[in-house]
Image (cartoon, rainbow, N blue to C red):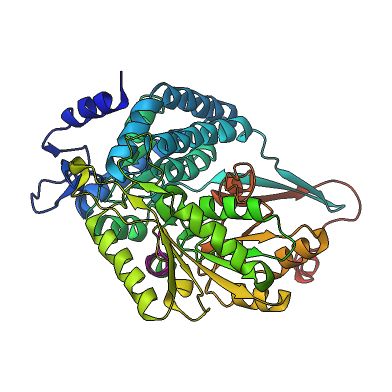
Amino acid sequence: MAVAQRAAELLSSFPETSVYRWSCDDTSRRFAVENPATGKTITTIQAGNVETTNAAIEASQAAFVNWKSRAPQDRCSFLLRASDEVQKNAQELALLLCLENGKPFKDAIIDVFFLIQVFKYFGSIADKLPSEFFDQGNVYSTIIYEPLGVCAGIIPFNWPPIHVGGKLAPCLAAGNTMILKPGEQAPLTAIRIVEILQTIFPPDVVQVVPGLGPDVPQALVNHPLVKMVSFTGSSPVGAKVASAAGSSLTATALELGGKNAFVVFDDANLDTVVRDAVEGAYFNKGEACTASSRILVHRSLYQPFVDKMTAAVSKLQAGNGLDDATHVGPVVSQERKQQILAAIDLAKSQGARLAAQGIVSTDAEIADGFFVPPTLFADVTPEMAVAVEEIFGPVACVSAFDTEDEAVEIVNASRYGLFAGVYSTEFSRAMRVARRVEAGVVLVNNYFRGVLGTPFGGVKDSGHGREHWIGTLREWSQIKNIRYPSGLGAPLPQWRAIPEIFQ
């Protein structure tokens, strides 16, 4: 069956108003989920509120009592079965993601593949996280990693399957239960994933509460039964989450914004660099905290790079994600479209040169879609807003530098520190710069962001905590130190008063 036909059938399956277990009865708490390619409403969601969120937390706590006691091998079995079940529904999930987020169907299937893999990954290692043992002579000490309890995952609209998997898989593997709050612009994929997982996991181990505005996230962060909050989103909102969680000493993991630098030295392979720069900047419509939106090129290579990059960006096709010819889909909402267009206008007014824009489809069926042409600015100086602010759209800028020190200084002047790309055929220089730049992940002579199995996360205003690797299991756990006499060596020390009063 053609993708377009399957899409039409999927759209027709949604009721006018979608009501879920933790939806409230207040009809003022409804919000529309739109197809960004057409501007048409897919369905209207009845959101939850503080009361339903609290009820979900109570149910999650009740489920935790039994879930935490399951052997790690049992939890592995659940995660591996979940991976298989998602695999069976991969086409539906990718299509739903395309319809509500706008990204091309061919890209959406990659997101779902990651979800499958991340459940396999943590399902394969959850029983292999080693405890630690310390021999201190007359005392032995055993370090145990125990579950935290009820946890909350608050995710945005840009990579729903990736964010769901990145939070749920390690959280559940460590023995916790989780309540997800998806981004309101594109919640349907996350909700459907949870529905699939609920057919595998015990009742209430994994739940989802749709929310409108700050009420549901605030209820999750402030509830005393919630022991950890993992948030992915903008840095300003992340700061609010951290502040609220801090008042109750609730643990947080924050994966926040990025203004990622892509540094090109004079000896870099120009063809490789341009290919990677286009992918880094425009994949997923630039709606990525990892997007390489500020490109720094050594002055000797600057003009050839700009020429090649201009030619490449001019060929990018923006259109319906159901169309095989589409490279870049619409941005997620009309509001985001207006914000990105305003950022483009600001860049022009500040003196940035508009070097190229891609082609936006003229198909009448998507005339009301939320399209922004892939845009490239050149001759940008570091203080311009386009080089400083996270735009979160298909916009990139190019600046020139003269020395290694200057390049590092420009990179580190950003308040963000998530990703950086470094391109040089001189290994020692590439590694030196990789060590000097302030970023959680540095990609050398590549911009492949598939980091599963290795740590993902940022520094500075890009947040804290690391996802997608074995160490993540420790972040979703609490440490218990159990100490006991070994029976070897000298007796354990005692307070000096003890021999005196017990003689």
Which image quarter: residue 466?
bottom right
The foreground one among 5 and 18 is: 5
Residue sitting at the far left? 27
Identity of the residue furthest to the top in this view: 1
Say left or right for 237 vs 113.
left
Q: Is residue 96 above or below residue 255?
A: above
**How far across and how far down the image is residue 187, in percent?**
29, 44
**276 or 284: which is nearer to us?**
276
x and y percentages locating residue 318 in the rendered image: 35, 48
Q: Looking at the picture, does residue 202 appear above or below residue 142?
A: above
Residue 335 belongs to magenta span: no
Regarding residue 418, the answer to whether it shows in the image is no
Q: Is residue 236 magenta?
A: yes
* The C terminus - image quarter: bottom right
Q: Which residues are magenta?
A: 233-241
Q: Residue at x 80, y 60 (%)?
A: 426
